[in-house]
Image (tube, rainbow, N blue to C red):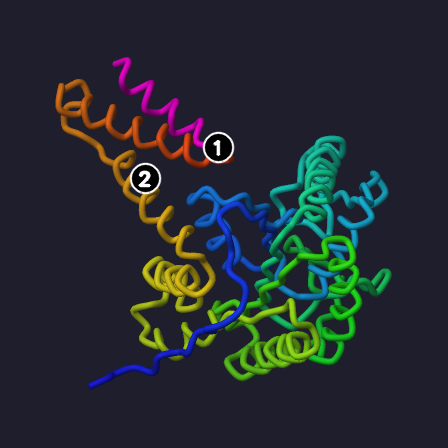
Amino acid sequence: MEFRTKVELPAKGPKIQHTDRLMIWGSCFSEHIGNLLAEHKFNCDVNPFGVLYNPMSIATSIHCLLKKALYQKEDLREEQGGWYSLMHHSTFSSHKAEDCLLKINQRIAQGHKNLKQADWIIFTWGSSFVYTWKENGEIVGNCHKLSSRLFERKMVSADEITAIYLPLLQELKAVRPNLQCLFTVSPIRHLKDGLHGNQLSKANLLIAIDQICSQMDFCHYFPSYEIMIDELRDYRFYADDMMHPSPLAIQYIWECFCNCYFTPSTLSFLKEWNKIRQGLAHRPFNPESEAYQTFLSQILLKIEDLKEKLPYLDVQKEIKLCQAQLKK
């Protein structure tokens, strides 16, 4: 007997090679997937502006990278001795305007380069609710816990989202003709919108993605949202806040993603690399024992063998870790 509804994963479409360059945009769920990609040695740029939840802010940020529009001091705001950007996550904020600008502009320069070289852009949209700054009516990326009276909150429609993304994607495709785009909706529940409001918000995102993918053959959809609410509908797959997926749920969605979009050679590499990661994570009772030193030597040989087979692989950190342990 089958006690759950299995989500049908896309069976056809392009596959992600381990050598591909990836750019990840979106909600904190995209950070989870981006971190997993980075841990498995993919070349990926995750959220150049920090976490962004709505598709409109993401589109604005991509336009900024395309133009390489560097920020000036007048683009920042200052509050109680802290400088920040309404388009950036608080990790870019600083007590000095110069430091804030440096962090922002370094990521814009880096993101501009990576965007022009990207083979895949992965979008994870979290909400179709947006906040506009009342002073100028512009949609912001982050409210920085400022007073709600400074913003106007509204829901954008699927048609509004589609109207912004169709020309943007065409522009990206012109820059990078072989580009592939993958869309997904974050499974994180925005309970502050209410259960009904959250469903309406997600529905707009799903409809917009369907409209985009039906008009552009290089755009694809991965059903992370459906996997969470249908396959993993039990509350044991949620974190303590009952909004975010648990680590187990994230791992399951990651495995679905891998099996759906990775080539056989990439899956083979992941299997080999995971063995190395597990070995490096092992904590022995006696690090100086002959058995553990032999164990480390074997791991080092495996890493060096992988590096020889895949010259592009950045494993310097892991090699140094092994060498440092072997010196003890």
**227 is higher (above) or lower (below) than 307:** below
**83 is higher (above) or lower (below) than 14:** above
Quick check: marks 2 and 1 in contact, CB under 8 Å? no
Frontmost of labels 2 and 1 is: 1
Disc with the residue nearer the chain's start (2 vs 1): 2
Q: Quadrant of residue 287?
A: top left
> Would residue 1 appear left or right of 26 to someone viewing this image?
left
What percent of the width, then of the height, locates residue 54?
Answer: 65, 65
**35 is higher (above) or lower (below) than 136:** above
The residue positioned 69% from the left and 44% from the top of the image is 111
Magenta stretch bounds: 314-328
Q: Residue furthest top?
A: 327
The residue positioned 74% from the left and 68% from the top of the image is 165
The residue positioned 48% from the left and 32% from the top of the image is 311
Q: Amino acid at mark 2?
A: Arg
**174 is higher (above) or lower (below) than 166:** above
Asked if residue 324 is among those painted magenta in the image, a careful observer would answer yes
Q: Residues within 10 Å of mark 1 (few under 14, many from 20)?
A: few
Q: Residues within 10 Å of mark 2 (few under 14, many from 20)?
A: some
Q: Which mark is residue 277?
A: 2
**Which residue in the structure is indicated by mark 1?**
311
Q: How many marks?
A: 2
- Helix, strand or loop for disc 2: helix
Task: Answer yes or no: is residue 34 visible.
Answer: yes
